[in-house]
Image (cartoon, grey):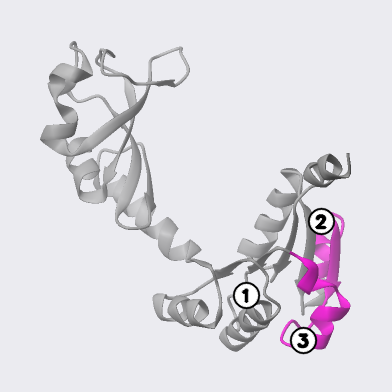
Amino acid sequence: MAKDTQKARPSRVVVIGLGRFGGSLAVELVERGSEVLALDNRPHLVQQFSDAVTHAAVADTTDPEVLRQLDVPDFRRAVVAIGDDLEASILTTSLLADFEIPHIWAKAVSRQHGRILERVGAHRVVLPEHDMGERVAHLVTGRMLDYIQFEDDYAIVKTRAPAAAVERPLSETRVRSKYGVTVVGIKRLGEGFTYATQETVLHHGDILIVSGRSRDVERFADLT
């Protein structure tokens, strides 16, 4: 019974840095059911988010004793969202690694900053401004309706069905062998998304979810 209760407990996340990225992330985590401890060294930001998160505190997160007093070592998930002070970002991430927190995400303002964060212990580095800029660039210059790139040059895009692939089953279009992509899902006007199969017949106007290497999905989207 105790084991079931443990499973039912909400996840606990400490978010350090309450700028635009960290603040919106903290609020979103709470809305998704997480308990969030939000920390920043700027009192006005802590005050701003105090009613939106589980706990908020003004703290110098480069001081290990301060973090211990706030029970930060007890958390399994931490996000370092400090973007305006690189030294504080790196020192804070290093301390979290010293505490052996299993899952550490850290915001970087450049690729070089990101590499340093990884070296001092971040398990996952995010570059919000860079990633969003790259995503918008793909949407502006291509024919994609949405674009999400993952690691290792892999992407998922939303695009319209190209004329070369409509009015016949996917198995006959040879999309995977010709373009190196996989049609994962399909949406027709007035209907929700459904998984695509080899028997799925595409029609003009269908919206597709396509996965593959970035270069391949871009080439496929350009067919529309």
Crowd band around label 3 with a 10 angstrom C-alpha radius: few (<14), some (14–19), many (20+): some
Residue 181 screen position, x and y as percent: 23, 37
Tell me where the magenta segment starts and ends, as one range: 46-75
Amino acid type indicated by mark 1:
Ile
Amino acid type indicated by mark 2:
Val
The residue that appears at 17% across and 42% down in the rendered structure is 219
Residue wearing tag 1: 82
Q: Is residue 164 left or right of residue 116?
A: left
Q: Disc 3 and disc 1: Cα gap in Å?
A: 16 Å
Q: Is residue 133 left or right of residue 90?
A: left
Residue wearing tag 3: 64
Residue 67 lies within the magenta run: yes
Q: Nearer the viewer, mark 3 or mark 1?
A: 3
- Say if residue 45 shows up in the picture: no
Residue wearing tag 2: 53
User: Picture quarter containing residue 198?
Assistant: top left
